[in-house]
Amino acid sequence: MLIAHLADTHIGAIQYGLLEREEDFYSAFRKAIDKAIEEHVRLVLISGDVVDKPRLGGKPLRVLYHELKKLRDRGIDVVVILGEHDFKRVRGEEPILYLFADQGLVKVIGIGDRLYIKRNVDGYELLVAGVSKHRRNEIKHLLKKLQQLQSVSSNYSGKSVLMLHQGLKEVNPHAGEISVDNLPKNFNYYALGHYHVMNVGIRVGDRGIAAYPGSTEVLRVDELVKEVVLGTRKALTAEKGFLIVDLSGDEPIIHRVGIDVRPQFRIELDLKLFELKNILNTLANALAKLSIKPVLHIKFRGKIENTKQLDTLLSATVGKYVLTYRWEMEDSESISEHCTVPKDYFDMDKELHSIIVKELGSEELARLALDILEIVRSSTQEHQKVHELAELIDRKLLGDVK
């Protein structure tokens, strides 16, 4: 009996306000559904945060409809519980997933008194129980429901699964809300959601195993935990996917299934201006070899006074090879006034000018590009930026290229 365990799909998320990132979440969901079908699973469980926000537009609704219908058309049931992103705590407002439940595309459990359902899957009697997301101030209510399910599972002789969208303290002591000891002990498999990094093999009682499949796409930088080499530098990236669980034997057998998503990299660099040019060029060469433009996160160790120049340098080197780059400065003491400046120390303005001249093949165009960048990256209001850009372009068109 094979089941697919997904969580935290966050359909409708638009990371960094980029439409490409919205499409990435749809793509990851489609790939997960297609792979689940290829693996001949008989049941799909989604442990909360199916959507990114309680109210969705037409496009994410259509994506959900088509993928869920794809499963239904193949006789594959889908059972979901609600995460904090799936419903708005407003009296009288219903979760969007109820719409798909009305169409027979999903079974929603974990709300009100509907805490479990029973299914016959490949000749096996299966109990699927679940409780939707409870906040920290609601944990007492959650524990009461778990006690109810303890008695239900104790009187059940078949295979059983418990779905939760909560953080375990054993996995993350700071973000955890409950511990393994709070879980009822009679379930075979604990299909967890909420943590976005995959974690399998958590023992519960004598025979149970709990697991987080992680999110199907990257939502936060702290999900980048796998060490890789980018160019010549150590970086962190993420592996995404879901789990396939075989419940046929005495204990669940868990298989990790990876899905290809847009790469994201996190890298830390010392902010030494005399080395930065070579470092960024090496990174750019490595990024240029990727088949899809990644998202790049850079943390600089050190300080620099002119952050606009640093951002412009990043744009001119790695910018063309990434979908977007994000950078931050780590607080540290400034370089001492008395330090010896190496002979190969470079002037950033001069370096930027050289890079842009080489790219555009024209001294005049390079000066125009630098003027435009200075206006665009200024702290002035948008309408003032537009006015200054219009004046600048008018002057160039009139022949004033000084």
Image (spheres, helix red, strand yellow):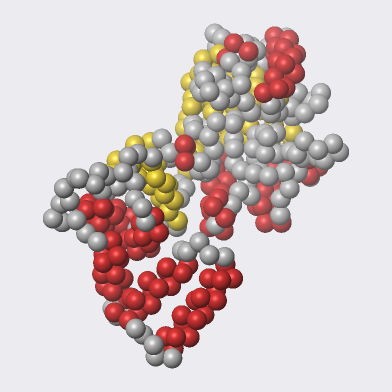
The reply, left or right, for residue 35 in relation to residue 82 is left
Q: Is residue 313 above or below residue 98?
A: below
Specify whether residue 239 is in view.
no
For the point 51% across and 75% down, the residue is 388
- Residue 174, position as x, y percentages in the image: 53, 23
Specify whether residue 47 is in view.
yes
For the point 61% across and 18% down, the residue is 178
**Nearer the observer, 262 or 41:** 262
The reply, left or right, for residue 237 in relation to residue 21 is left
Residue at the far right in the pictured view: 92
Q: Is residue 321 above or below residue 241?
A: below
Dividing the picture into quadrants, the one containing residue 387 is: bottom right
Q: Is residue 80 above or below residue 302?
A: above
- Residue 354, position as x, y percentages in the image: 26, 69
**Nearer the observer, 375 or 255:** 375
For the point 57% across and 58% down, the residue is 19
Quarter of the figure with the N terminus? top right
Quarter of the figure with the C terminus? bottom left
**Nearer the observer, 79 or 94:** 94
- Residue 260, position as x, y percentages in the image: 45, 46
Please count the marks in the image. 0
- Residue 73, position as x, y percentages in the image: 68, 46
The reply, left or right, for residue 307 in relation to residue 36 is left
**Nearer the observer, 248 or 398:** 398
The reply, left or right, for residue 369 in relation to residue 122 is left
